[in-house]
Each structure stands twice: as C-alpha cells, then as structure tokens.
Image (spheres, rainbow, N blue to C red):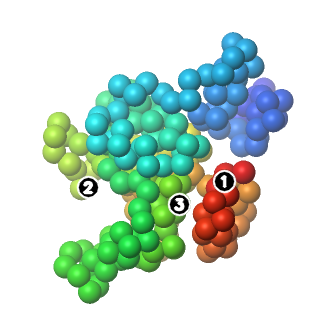
C-alpha cells in the first residue's frame, strides 16, 4: 500500500480530513489514540528563539504547532529559520500595503487590512538566517517551502500573482475549496462575532 493511502486511511479512522499528509494534527490524534491521554499542546518551546516564540504566540492555536514543526524540521535539515511575522492588525496591514506606494520602501504585499490571512492569525512569515544575519534571498526558502507543504501548509512561493517565499498559512478545513476572498470575508465575519475560526 502506498504511504499516502496509508496516512489517509489512518486519518479517516481518527476522524480527520484524509489529506495524506502526516502533519501535527495527524500526529496529535495518533498520540491520543495510542497513548490514551491528551498530548502536549505545543512542541518543545526550546525549539524557538525568543522572537519566534513571541510571534508564534500571536497565531491561532491551531496554527502554532505547524509553525513550530516548520522550525524544527528546517533545523533538522540544517536550515535556521525564525518566525518573524504573525498576526497583524488591520492598521499594521494597511501600513505594510502603503510601503512602496504612498510610503517609503519596497512593495511587500498586495493585501490591505482585512484582505490578509495575517489579520486572522492563520498566516506567518519566516526568515532564513546564517548565524545572526537575515537572508533576504536564499535557495533555502524553496527547501523550507517544500517542508511546509509536506506539513499541510499553503506556501506563498507557489503563488502566481505575488510570489512570497517567506509566507505560510493554514487554511481552515471548512474553507478548503473556497475562493480566497470568500474565505477572508467569512474569517472577518467570524472574528467580528467572536466565533472560532477553525470550527
């Protein structure tokens, strides 16, 4: 039996969406079934540097294990990454949108406030580092992108209109086949009504 088919079968038996990717949600469910108690809700906090830990803490609880796993798996491949941007307010997003347009700097986003997954805590950006030096461009971004895709994250490096290799996001299951704008409108509605974004 092919490994992806085996993972899908396990996910189905555990009541998960059978996507064939053994990410943090799958391993959490496997742990609970085999060990019989609740697994730790976070990965080893020592896996993150202080800045990354603060940034990851701003994300939705469902997204945090994915961000931590990305850092850990990149490190296992000899790639040092830090999570450098997480949840943003609409005002922070508007300020980023202004860069290269009405404010100094280069264009870094095409999304205004309310139009970014960062506004809802389901997206984060990473940086590749060589020691303490941030690398704006590196082939390692593609390697980390592949790791993120393997975890079940969406990767901005695969986008057509605005390629964003440092960007990762976790799409809620209910939005799997939704157009991006429709999903963002629903996230905005849920957030305004203080509803869970992933249920």
Q: Secondary structure at mark 1?
A: loop
In terms of secondary structure, where does tag 3 sit?
Answer: helix
Question: Of residues 92 and 25, which is closer to you in this image?
Answer: 92
Determine the residue located farthest toward the front in the rendered image.
Answer: 193
- Quadrant where the image shows the N terminus: top right
Mark 1–mark 2 distance (CA, rounded to whole Å): 36 Å
Is residue 70 depicted above or below 76 in this figure? below
Tags 2 and 3 in contact by the CB under 8 Å rule? no
Q: Residue 135's mark?
A: none
Tell me residue 87's x, y (percent). 44, 57
Mark 2 crowdedness (10 Å alpha carbons): few <14, some 14-19, many ≥20? few
Q: Is residue 49 above or below residue 35?
A: below
How crowded is the residue under tag 3: few (<14 C-alpha within 10 Å), some, or many (20+)?
A: many
Question: Which residue is disc 3 drawn over?
Answer: 120
Name the quadrant containing residue 94.
bottom left
Left or right: 19 with respect to 69?
Answer: right
- Where does the image place residue 180, in percent across and percent down from the top left? 61, 70
Q: Earlier in the sequence, mark 1 or mark 2?
A: 2
Task: Report the mark closest to the observer, 2 or 3.
Answer: 3
- Residue 155 showing in the rendered view: no
- Residue 7, located in which quarter of the rendered image? top right
| Residue that label 1 marks | 196
First of labels 3, 1 by sequence position: 3
Per the image, the residue denoted by label 2 is 137
Residue at the extreme bottom = 102
Considering every residue shown, the one lying at the far top of the view is 35
Of 34 and 154, the residue lying toward us: 34
Residue beneath the point at 16% across and 40% down = 132
Task: Give the CA separation, mark 3 to mark 1.
Answer: 11 Å
């Amino acid at each position: 039996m092919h490994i992806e088919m085996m993972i899908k079968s396990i996910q189905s038996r555990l009541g998960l969406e059978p996507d064939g990717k053994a990410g943090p949600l799958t391993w959490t469910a496997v742990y609970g079934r085999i060990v019989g108690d609740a697994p730790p809700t976070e990965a080893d906090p020592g896996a993150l540097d202080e800045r990354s830990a603060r940034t990851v803490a701003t994300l939705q609880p469902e997204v945090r294990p994915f961000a931590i796993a990305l850092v850990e798996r990149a490190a296992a491949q000899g790639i040092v990454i830090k999570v450098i941007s997480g949840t943003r307010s609409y005002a922070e997003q508007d300020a980023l949108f202004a860069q290269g347009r009405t404010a100094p700097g280069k264009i870094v986003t095409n999304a205004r406030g309310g139009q970014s997954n960062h506004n809802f805590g389901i997206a984060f950006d990473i940086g590749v580092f060589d020691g303490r030096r941030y690398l704006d461009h590196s082939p390692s971004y593609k390697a980390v992108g592949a790791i993120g895709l393997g975890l079940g994250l969406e990767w901005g490096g695969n986008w057509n209109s605005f390629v964003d290799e440092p960007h990762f996001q976790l799409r809620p299951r209910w939005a799997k086949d939704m157009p991006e704008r429709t999903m963002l409108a629903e996230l905005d509605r849920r957030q305004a009504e203080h509803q869970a974004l992933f249920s």
